[in-house]
Amino acid sequence: MELLRFATAGSVDDGKSTLIGRLLYDSKQIFEDQLEAVERTSLARGDDYVDLALLTDGLRAEREQGITIDVAYRYFATPKRKFIIADTPGHTQHTRNMVTGCSTADLVIILVDSRNGITEQTRRHATIASLLGIPHLVVCVNKMDLVGWSESRFEEVRAEVEAFSSRLAIADMTFIPISALTGDNVVERSPAMPWFKGTSLLHHLEELHIASDRNLIDLRFPVQWVVRPRSAEHHDYRGYAGQVAAGVMQPGDEVVVLPLGFSTRIASIETADGPLEAAFPPMSVIVRLADDLDVSRGDLICRPRNRPVVSQELSAMVCWMSEQPLRVGAKLAIKHTSRWARALVSELQYRLDINTLHRDRDAGELRLNDIGRVDLRTTTPLFFDEYRHNRATGSFILVDESTSATVAAGMIRRAGA
């Protein structure tokens, strides 16, 4: 079955964890002992209802405060599709966790409290979803039971969100009125809102077309590992393992290996289950080449007449994730696909106010959870595409070599300073 990755976002107490708990509960994905544990905890806290948010708020601090702090991942499946959910935190100080949780998502669900309407965090999370290039956005107007299932209130919130999002690059946006606490319009359509002609949230997630979101044109295969068995039976075996980042490749295709620049052909494509006739994203495979070339981890296989940008200079949007601020002149390690290099921050172009979208060109640094545009110069060439064309080859992380901590996530806008 096809896999859909989605993340939940929104302001604190808008019901993200409750929504996921309701999805899991109503789709029969919870074991009896899990439900019993949640019932006991709810009773111990004095709740007069079963708090399904406890199914995802796993940290003790989260349960005590009633908020999400870290990203919680949950897995479930229906007869139509498999899902991976990332429940992301709503607090401003946990923006980096939200970026991490949404980085691989096909879709983001942003919850909005129907009583409060659009908030600072709604704008922040919609902006981040746009920057991350997430193709599908679902705005769930939650707690409709607390506004009397009002159609007019739903339309007011919808207009607010649409007015702000008109300045963002969001290709597909859907609005669904729900009550996560009672389950209305979550798994089944709600009789309490007959004026809503759309589908339930789960039906939308099951039927959403995502196959065309992937880049199937520009072949990109970063080599993660060179496979050289030591047995006598396979003494001449040499394969290159990795995940297809973009494009489709088949045995017999002409390819070129960067940075060598030598052309060859694909001899075979294999997995643990045997040979394949074709590979496409996000499949993990072993590629064997017709010629014995010097290929190593970090190299890239692509088409001879469809190559990525090869450059030591790039300009990118970064989300800063460290307590220590980022300043011009900083030297960091950069990991791009399977390739490592060192990078110098040559310029900070601006810091983005993601609530107003104002570009502060006088900013001298990026602090924790800030997002800004920086220019980098690397010690060795990287093979990349613009992030809007390929999320896999257009993204990177920055690492502080002294602590081995990941300090930033970046999205490449273009080559050069």
Image: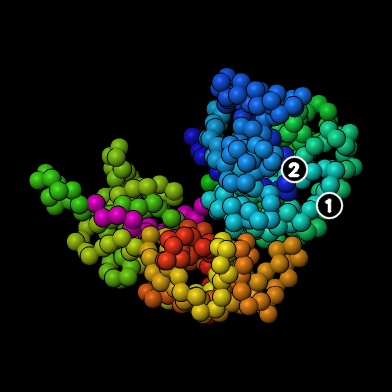
Q: Is residue 381 magenta?
A: no
Q: Main secondary structure of the magenta part?
A: loop
Q: Residue at x 71, y 67 (%)?
A: 353
Which quadrant holds residue 322? bottom right
Query: Visible in this render: residue 156?
Result: yes
Q: Which residue is mark 2?
A: 14
Identify the element where label 2 is drawn.
Answer: loop
Q: Where's residue 204, x and y in %?
A: 66, 38
- Asked if 29 appears above or below 363 in the picture, the reply is above
For marks 1 and 2, give the CA distance. Answer: 18 Å
| Mark 2 Cα shell of 10 Å, populated few (<14), some (14-19), many (≥20) | many
Q: Which residue is mark 1?
A: 159
Q: Residue at x 75, y 27 (%)?
A: 47
Amino acid type of the residue that numbered disc 2 sits on in the rendered structure: Asp
Mark 1 or mark 2: whose residue is earlier in sequence: 2
Which segment is the magenta one?
A: 213-227
Q: Could you tell whether 60 is left or right of 45 in the image?
A: left
Q: Residue 372 — which label?
A: none
Amino acid type of the residue that numbered disc 1 sits on in the rendered structure: Ala
Mark toward the viewer: 1 or 2:
2
- Asked if 1 appears above or below 360 in the picture, the reply is above
Q: Could you tell whether 305 is left or right of 202 in the image?
A: left
